[in-house]
Image (tube, coloured by chain):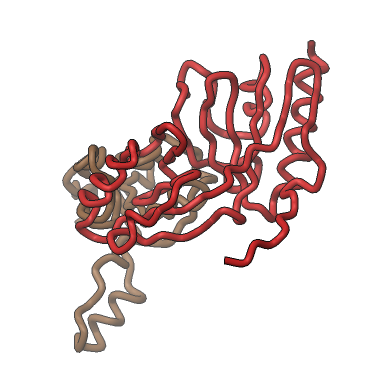
Amino acid sequence: MVSLIATDVFHGLLPVLQGPLQLAAATPARITSVMPFRGRAGAVQTALGRMGLGLPEPGQSREGKAAAILWSGRGQAFLLDADPEPLAGIAALTDQSDAWAVMRLTGPGWDQVLSRLVALDLRPSGFPEGAVARSGLNHMNALFRRLADGVEIWVFRSMAATAVEELAGAMARVAARG
Amino acid sequence: MRITCPLCGSRDRREFYYYGAADYLARPAEGAGLEAWDAYLHLRDNPAGMTKDLWYHEAGCSAWIEVTRDTTSHAVLSSRLVAAVESADLPGRSAPARKKAAPRKKKGTS
């Protein structure tokens, strides 16, 4: 396969540092959307099980040794950093590796940053590690995954610069409050 | 206003796109008469009370949802996935958290 030179999704806008808060690029090398064909969810579950994963329930994710899988919508999951070949024929597979811009927001107060932009309670108490939510980052469609020390924020690649600007602004205002 | 998505839980109304009355789910069969199509496309009740309509969770999980709500109190009473259960969900959650809509009460004039 021809290998092309990849361009940085964020064009050098990241990382952003504001006091104890950090926003860094974290786009997985390979993203494949998995949508089980009608009546084949069981087969997909089995195939993913052999990969050390499984189909995540709504709002959940699963971590394997090298790969991970996130629930990403109704009847859909994102397989990360794994070859989707074992799922061929039982699920609709789409390579979305270049479609998403993924950031990691970490540091104390990350939840206060999100509360300025997301109409959803993403505080640690209600959004435990591994939890996933589809919602809006201001007016952008986004996906959130809770990490041990912060949150992963996914937006469409075309929205990368806007998302960084919105998040950097919110980070500055949270950091300014000390 | 908040709407409960059967998959995502309680969400802000701004995450949803309004489509119209749930009558759109009852599409006439192929070869149905003109009257059936006319009713399907154009004739709608305008109830003071319980009504059902379709919402799309566009800034969320992309599910179509049938929402039962009260036009007089603005209360959102229940919601369910429009898609068949078979394809609607992933295993481990065989039956989506759907609430049964309360039976249609005839209020006032009938």
Q: Residue at x 24, y 39 (%)?
A: B93
Q: Residue at x 52, y 46 (%)?
A: B15
| Quadrant where the image shows the C terminus of chain B | bottom left
- Residue A153, by quadrant, is top right
Residue B75 seen in this snapshot: no
In the image, B47: left or right of A1? left
- Rendered view: A134 above or below A75: above
Give the residue at the far front of this rendering: A1
Residue B77's spot in the image, x, y percent? 31, 39
Front-most of residues B94 and A41: A41
In the image, A103: left or right of A40? right
Residue B38's spot in the image, x, y percent? 30, 81
Give the residue at the far left of this rendering: B103
Colour in which the image shows chain A? red
Front-most of residues A17 and A6: A6
Q: Residue at x 48, y 36 (%)?
A: A133
Give the residue at the far top of this rendering: A178
Residue A132's spot in the image, x, y percent? 46, 34
- Rendered view: A13 above or below A33: above
Q: Residue at x 26, y 38 (%)?
A: B97
Letter of the brown chain: B
- Rendered view: A12 above or below B83: above
